[in-house]
Image (cartoon, rainbow, N blue to C red):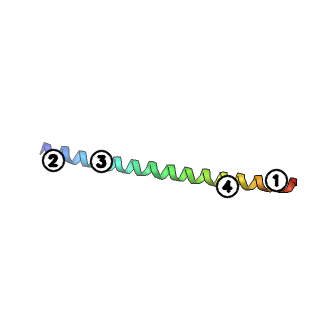
Amino acid sequence: MNHLNVEIARAQMTARLGEATQARRTHQLARSLRMHRKAEQAAQDARTALARAL
């Protein structure tokens, strides 16, 4: 019985580790997308400012 409990605990730990890894990847992707949008907006603002200056 004790061996079965250890196996169940190990399986749960592995599942939680997988979920945490996936959550971290999702968070990193979302952050990258936000940074990309900000960079694109800054580039567009710079192009607009340059066009107005000319």
What residue sits right under mark 1 in the picture?
A: 50
| Spatial CA span between label 4 and label 2 | 54 Å
4 or 14, which is in the foreground?
A: 14
Residue at 83%, 57% in the rendered image: 51
Checking the image for residue 14, the label placed there is: 3
Residue 27 image point, x, y percent: 50, 50
Label 4 environment density (alpha carbons within 10 Å; few <14, some 14–19, many ≥20): few
- Element marked by disc 2: helix
- Element marked by disc 1: helix
Q: Amino acid at mark 1?
A: Leu
- Element marked by disc 4: helix
Q: Is residue 51 above or below residue 5?
A: below
Residue at 43%, 50% in the rendered image: 23
Residue 42 image point, x, y percent: 71, 51
User: Earlier along the polypeptide chain: callout 1 or callout 3?
Assistant: 3
Checking the image for residue 4, the label placed there is: 2
Residue 42 as seen in the image, left or right of residue 29: right
| Spatial CA span between label 3 and label 4 | 39 Å
User: Earlier along the polypeptide chain: callout 2 or callout 3?
Assistant: 2
Label 1 environment density (alpha carbons within 10 Å; few <14, some 14–19, many ≥20): few
Residue 4 as seen in the image, left or right of residue 45: left
Marks 2, 3: nearer the viewer: 3
Pointer 1 with pointer 3, Cβ within 8 A = no
| Spatial CA span between label 2 and label 3 | 15 Å
Residue 26 image point, x, y percent: 47, 53
Q: Amino acid at mark 3?
A: Thr
User: Earlier along the polypeptide chain: callout 3 or callout 4?
Assistant: 3
Residue at 67%, 55% in the rendered image: 40
Q: Amino acid at mark 4?
A: Glu
What residue sits right under mark 4 in the picture?
A: 40
| Spatial CA span between label 1 and label 3 | 54 Å
